[in-house]
Image (cartoon, rainbow, N blue to C red):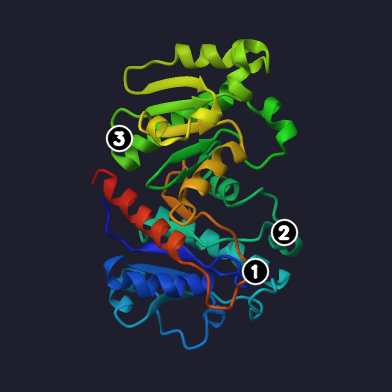
Amino acid sequence: MTDAPIALSCGDPAGIGPELAVKAWRALGQDLPFFWIGDPRHLPKDTPIVPIQDPADAQRAAAEGLAVLPHPFAAEARPGTPSAENAAGVIEVLKRAVALVQTGQAAAMTTAPISKQVLIDGADFAYPGHTEFLAALAGVERVVMMLASPALRVVPATIHIPLSQVPQALTRQCLSDTITITADGLRRFFGIAHPRIAVAGLNPHAGEGGKLGQEEIRWINALVAEWPQTDMTVTGPHPADTMFHEAARSRYDVAIAMYHDQALIPIKTLDFDLGVNVTLGLPFIRTSPDHGTAFDIAGQGIANPTSLIEALKCARQMARAQPA
């Protein structure tokens, strides 16, 4: 358990991240101390900020304004108009947040949304997204992305790849690693001693006995059946179209889906605003809101901070769930 503050990365400064940080501070105040890492010039005008040099000062600072760990960027930011000039700064902020969590100065990190295209254009970013970049910084070969809300937890076994590539990427090792990392994360960070894991089928109706696809009968059925049930319960493969109604959700702690949309459509339909992205398998805690940069509404003051607030709350709960 740790009560160190949460590090909040700025995300793309032209997106809604800066204004959401201010709204989160106004909602949480000193009840959940966090500090924002970024260039103060990128925050909305008239934001009450308290520059800090030591994360330990975040709670004290929160009584007066948003605690800011200043990180200068190359250029100012225009809401809704992303700039490749600031791409390197976004990446450096992420590296800085990781270092603070790894040294214990922050209990966890929450990341505001980035634009992968801007990072590619401005800094030759070589990763599909936040998750893969953080795994590389941590020296971890495999992590999983869990989307969590009060209604549902779901993990896609494959993430940011074209649908046509899913059958090749979805190997026995991939699914086995996903189950293992997910179960470990539920035990360590969510206090679930015996996780119940429901595995979705890849094909419609979980292949319907091979009539609608062969992957289930070739290896998925066997992997699930052979899984040791001593410290967890693994069931499936279940037809994905019957896994997410209320009665079905009551029978598991997390659903493992086979690809991105199979996982994200249910949770965004059930609980769009309260969904949180949690990266499991890292040696530190990372959460993020379950939405993007929203350049189209940036700077208008209408962005909903609920998902970011939930991401910060989730990070705090995960940090406190760890053994001392």
**Badge 3 local density, few (<14 within 10 Å), some, or many (20+)?**
some
Badge 1 amino acid? Phe
Q: Which residue, given by chain and number where applicable, does mark 2 sit on?
A: 117
Q: Which of 88/249 is in front?
A: 249
Name the secondary structure under disc 3. loop
Q: Which residue, given by chain and number where applicable, does mark 1 sit on?
A: 295
Badge 2 amino acid? Gln
Q: Which of 111/44 is in front?
A: 44
Please tell me the numbered disc located at residue 38. Answer: none
* Vertical position of residue 147 compared to residue 78: above or below: above
Badge 3 amino acid? Ile
**Going 61% across and 68% down the picture, which residue do you hit?**
89
Whole-Å distance between the Cαs marked 3 and 1?
38 Å
Would residue 52 be seen by someone viewing this image from the given angle? no
Q: In the orientation shown, which residue stands out farthest toward the left? A: 324
Q: Which of 242/298 is in front?
A: 242
* Vertical position of residue 19 compared to residue 153: above or below: below
Whole-Å distance between the Cαs marked 3 and 2?
38 Å
Would residue 251 be seen by someone viewing this image from the given angle? yes
Side of 37 where 61 appears, left or right: left
Name the N-terminal-most of marks 3 and 2: 2
**Going 54% across and 60% down the picture, which residue do you hit?**
94
**Badge 2 local density, few (<14 within 10 Å), some, or many (20+)?**
some
* Vertical position of residue 127 compared to residue 48: above or below: above
Residue 84 in the image, given as x and y percentages of width and height: 72, 69
Residue 236 in the image, given as x and y percentages of width and height: 48, 20
Name the N-terminal-most of marks 3 and 1: 3
Give residue 157's quadrant in the image. top right
Whole-Å distance between the Cαs marked 1 and 2?
13 Å
